[in-house]
Image (cartoon, helix red, strand yellow):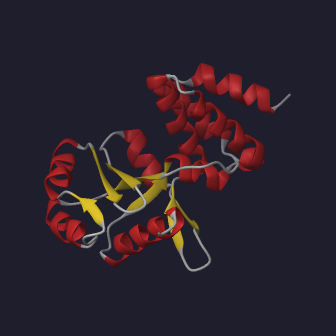
Amino acid sequence: MKSEKKIFSEVIGILEKLNIPYMIGGSVASIYYGEPRMTLDMDVVIQLKPEQAKKFSASFGDEYYADLEQMLNAIDVQGHFNIIQSEAGVKVDFYVLKNDAFSQSGFTRKKKESFSEERSAYFASPEDTILKKLEWHKMGGSQKHLEDIRGMLKVSGDVLDKKYIDKWSLKLGVNDVWKKLFGEFNQ
């Protein structure tokens, strides 16, 4: 059975082969910039056009669930879709890039980093990963997002653009939680 990392690497390879702009976010990005933890999925922001969707869905073959209609619908509503590697049950969630200022800003700030020994990949910046984790926490209350942020502060806190996080945390309505977490880091 293929490992999560091998599956994630295959997905990145397909995106790059088809010249589809992307960036990895969520738990995989927070692990990259922070502390390790288990995850069976990868979140990817994707700039997918309707004319690319058919070729993209067909690129995965029989071992993956990849629904073209789900992709096209996600493009229409700037929503999300997923693909699942059947044998391992590993999922990749794709979020179609939104037109709002925060999403656009984050996408322009993506960074090419080492993903594995053989491959590099585009990741959301650590600042944008923190901000997105704060938004997800606000929506669902999951402590997992706060723990990911604490891990990122521990590992990457000294190099973060705190002014950028301050600015966007105010605009996104998550500044109170950000200030509390950052205060814990500075004790």
Residue 80 picture quarter: top left
* Residue 67 x/y as whole percent: 19, 57
Q: Judge left or right: residue 87 versus residue 4.
A: left
Q: Is residue 82 above or below residue 20?
A: above
The residue drawn where x is 26% and y is 73% is 59
Q: Judge left or right: residue 46 versus residue 27.
A: left
The front one of 89 and 143 is 89
Q: Is residue 44 above or below residue 87?
A: above
The residue drawn where x is 46% and y is 24% is 140
The residue drawn where x is 61% and y is 22% is 177
The extreme right residue here reads 187
- How many numbered circles are shown? 0
The front one of 92 and 114 is 92
The front one of 38 and 31 is 38
* Residue 50 x/y as whole percent: 15, 60
Quarter that holds the C terminus: top right
Q: Judge left or right: residue 168 versus residue 65.
A: right
The residue drawn where x is 67% and y is 24% is 179
Q: Is residue 170 above or below residue 44?
A: above
* Residue 168 x/y as whole percent: 52, 33
* Residue 102 x/y as whole percent: 42, 40
